[in-house]
Image (cartoon, helix red, strand yellow):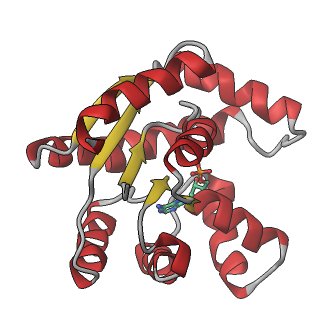
Amino acid sequence: MSARLVLLGPPGAGKGTQAARISERLGVPAISTGDIFRANVAEQTELGRRAQRYMDAGEYVPDEVTNAMVRDRLAQRDAADGFLLDGYPRTADQVAELDGMLADAGTELTAVVELTADTDEVVARMLRRAAEQGRPDDTEVVIRRRLEVYAEQTAPLADRYAGRGLLLRVDGLGGIDEVTERIMGALASRLG
Ligand code: AMP
């Protein structure tokens, strides 16, 4: 069954973890723009060089860079029958671009899942993750900036998708298995 899904939610809400599990259950690739950017930074590619300073500051990479990258990724064979986008779209411009890409391919989104989480909880989670993964650059200032950018630019996208009847809101607090089941339960109605 083909599912074309978007996973929305603030940084630290557990999107990456859930994306991996949901993509495995549904047999579609999880495409994380953050992971693709990080891999490019690690390999010091041209794309990585362009993205890094924005990432380090907790800001979004410019839309034209991000959109071109996603267009390339979605054109790959494994995404032809479905995908789960984790961390894209994040701006109104990206929503419009994604609509265009899907229209070009003669397809449309199946659903948009928004993982909700409390701000203090996500800050605490991200600080823990920064300490565990030895990412001292992931300071509280940068983390709070990321949440601010999310609230300003990305949170409003949920309403747009709700207006199109695509939005499924899922509580992201709780155990990993519990949240996966909530997401699968919410998706069941759409995956028929
Ligand atoms: P993430 O792991 O999804 O939180 O992404 C890490 C960083 O990559 C973000 O803080 C942004 O700097 C950048 N990034 C990831 N996805 C996007 C996107 N859709 N638009 C702009 N920047 C992005």
Q: Residue 81's quadrant in the figure?
A: bottom left
Quadrant of the snapshot with the C terminus = top left
Whether residue 49 is situated above or below residue 160 in the rendered picture: below
Left or right for 156, reference 61: left
Measured as percent of width and height from the top left, residue 173 is found at: 51, 16
Measured as percent of width and height from the top left, residue 161 is found at: 19, 48
Whether residue 67 is situated above or below residue 134 in the rendered picture: below
At a point 76% along the width and 83% down the height, the residue shown is 45
Quadrant of the snapshot with the N terminus = bottom left
Measured as percent of width and height from the top left, residue 133 is found at: 86, 38
At a point 59% along the width and 20% down the height, the residue shown is 177
Measured as percent of width and height from the top left, residue 83 is found at: 46, 60
Q: Nearer the viewer, residue 78 or 102?
A: 78
At a point 50% along the width and 79% down the height, the residue shown is 65
At a point 68% along the width and 30% down the height, the residue shown is 126
Q: Residue 4's quadrant in the figure?
A: bottom left
Seen as rendered, the residue at the extreme right is 134
Q: Residue 120's quadrant in the figure?
A: top right
Left or right for 45, reference 87: right
Left or right for 68, reference 39: left
Q: Nearer the viewer, residue 102 or 70?
A: 102
Whether residue 141 is situated above or below residue 175 in the rendered picture: below
Q: Nearer the viewer, residue 114 or 47?
A: 114
- Ligand 1 shown in quarter: bottom right
The number of numbered badges drawn on the structure is 0
